[in-house]
Each structure stands twice: as structure tokens, then as C-alpha cells.
Amino acid sequence: MEKQEIKLIPIEKIDPPGTDQRDMIDPIKIVELAESIREKGLINPILLRPQNGRYEIVAGHRRFLAHQHLQAKVVPAILKEMDDVEVILYRAIENLQRENLTPMEEARAYWLMKTRGGMNIQETCRQTGKHENTVRRFLRIYEWPEYAQDAIEKKGLSIRVAEVLMDIDDSDMRKYYINMGAENGITLKVAEMWVSDYKKSKQGALFQETGAEEGMNVVPESRPVYVTCQCCYGAVEIREAKQLVVCGKCLKELRSTKKSSS
């Protein structure tokens, strides 16, 4: 196996990856990585490709940013001639091997392999070792509206819950339920109940518009959905519920105050 030579490249000659290729960067993680590099050094050099007298980052954007944070003059790197397709596929596959990969980063990697790398589903599965259903699932997620992607990426809504709520065919109602689900951390069972209630309400509205036959059971136009208040344990309609982030100790005090005042 050919040994790859590590070179020290001036940091001012290195260009970041293109805008559509960049990972979602957490500034706090960059600072943490920089401190690790300061203490232990850089374990894995970054990968660069020569570009018109400069160097483009193929892999190691976070490590590069960490060196910038440390105000380093040079960065240890391996140089490799690669065409655009090779770069895209390399980055996508490398990202998929990360332990802390987020759902949207995984979805984006498959999307890049398909649209920029020209790979079909079967080729993507062979390159990544992923099941076909997994690849198709994440490709669907990447086509979702931005609010749905943000609910997963930034608010912690589970993919399975989001998939259930995406079954709501009205775009405004779908956005409402997804945002509400993300804010309240709903379970899969609650999501399924919301979708079921929505479909029944829609069916009831249709009956009212077209006119139901005499004696036919008509589903009410709207059925309120309730959640449990975390302070008094009472039922509150989901549209009237408010979100309050408190620790366990403060929640107990709130409940204790509620009991003593009642």
C-alpha cells in the first residue's frame, strides 16, 4: 500500500469546500476540537486537492476551522488529485462514517451521492453498506419542507413522528402539527391520534358540504385534541397549551404552590 505523504500547507492557501458541500458547523464543537488539537496535536491530517495554485478542502473542514481558531500558520495535509465527482462521493461517504451524524446530514449525504455523484439507489447501498429502505427514507426526508427538517434537526422531533405527521395533506395544518409536536415532544401514539383526528374532522367537513344521507353518522367538523398540563395534571386543548421549560425541582415547587393555593 502506497504511503501518503503529509505536507504542511500554509493556511492562507486553503479554500473551504463549496457552499453546497459544507457540513452544518457547530461553533462550540470547533472550539472543543481546537482545544483537543492544542493539547494532543492533529491525529488525522486534512485531505486537500490542488486547485489553480491553491488547495480545496476535500475532507477535514472542521479540523481546518479548528486550526484557524488556534491562529495556526500551517495545517498538516495530504494532497490528492481528484475530479468533482470523486470529491463529492468522498465527502458524502466520509460524513456517513461519522459517529455524531445528524439525521439531516445523513439525508444530505445520500442526496449528494444521487444528484451530484450520479449514483442510483443500488450503487449508494453498495458504497455505504446501508439498506435500500434506509436510503430511500432519508432521500424522502431531504425533500421535506424546511420547517419539517428543522423540527428534526434543531428541535429533536423523532423521524418516525415526523413521518406520521407528514401524512396530513393540508400544508398549513401539517406545519402547525409538526411545530406543535416538536415543541411538546409528543410520542408516536399521540402523533397517530392527531392524524386520525384530523382525517376524521376533514371527512366530517366533507359530509357537511355534500350533505349526508338521513340517519348516517356524521363525524363532527372538529374534535379538540387535549394534552396533560405538567403543573396541575389537568387536560388542556392543544391549541391553548403553552410551553414552559423548567427543571424538575422548579416543577415540583410549581405543583406544590398550586396545591397549597387550591
Image: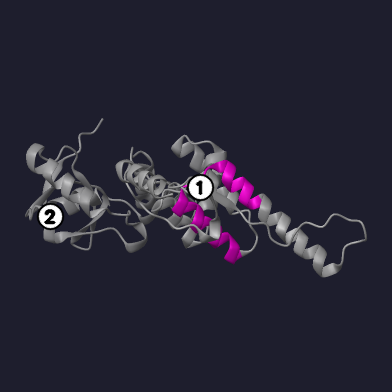
- Judging depth in this view, the residue of 227 and 13 nearest the camera is 227
Mark 1 and mark 2 lie on one chain; the one further toward the N terminus is: 2
Residue assigned mark 1: 138
What coloring was used for the rendering? one colour
Residue 242 spot, x, y in % from top left? 45, 58
In the displayed structure image, the side of residue 137 where residue 83 appears, left or right: left
Q: CA distance from mark 1 to mark 2?
A: 33 Å
Label drawn at residue 16:
none
Can residue 212 be seen here?
A: yes
Can residue 116 be seen here?
A: no
Specify the quadrant of the image occupied by residue 177.
Answer: bottom right
- Against 101, residue 214 (above or below) is below
Type of amino acid at the residue the image marks with label 2:
His
Residue 141 spot, x, y in % from top left? 52, 52
The residue furthest bottom is 209
Tell me if residue 188 is in the magenta stretch.
yes
Q: Secondary structure at mark 2?
A: helix
Q: Residue at x 56, y 46 (%)?
A: 136
In the displayed structure image, the side of residue 129 where residue 86 appears, left or right: left
| Magenta-highlighted residues | 171-195
Residue 151 spot, x, y in % from top left? 45, 54
Tell me if residue 247 is in the magenta stretch.
no
Q: Residue at x 77, y 60 (%)?
A: 204
Residue assigned mark 2: 69
- Judging depth in this view, the residue of 228 and 161 nearest the camera is 228
- Against 194, residue 249 (above or below) is above
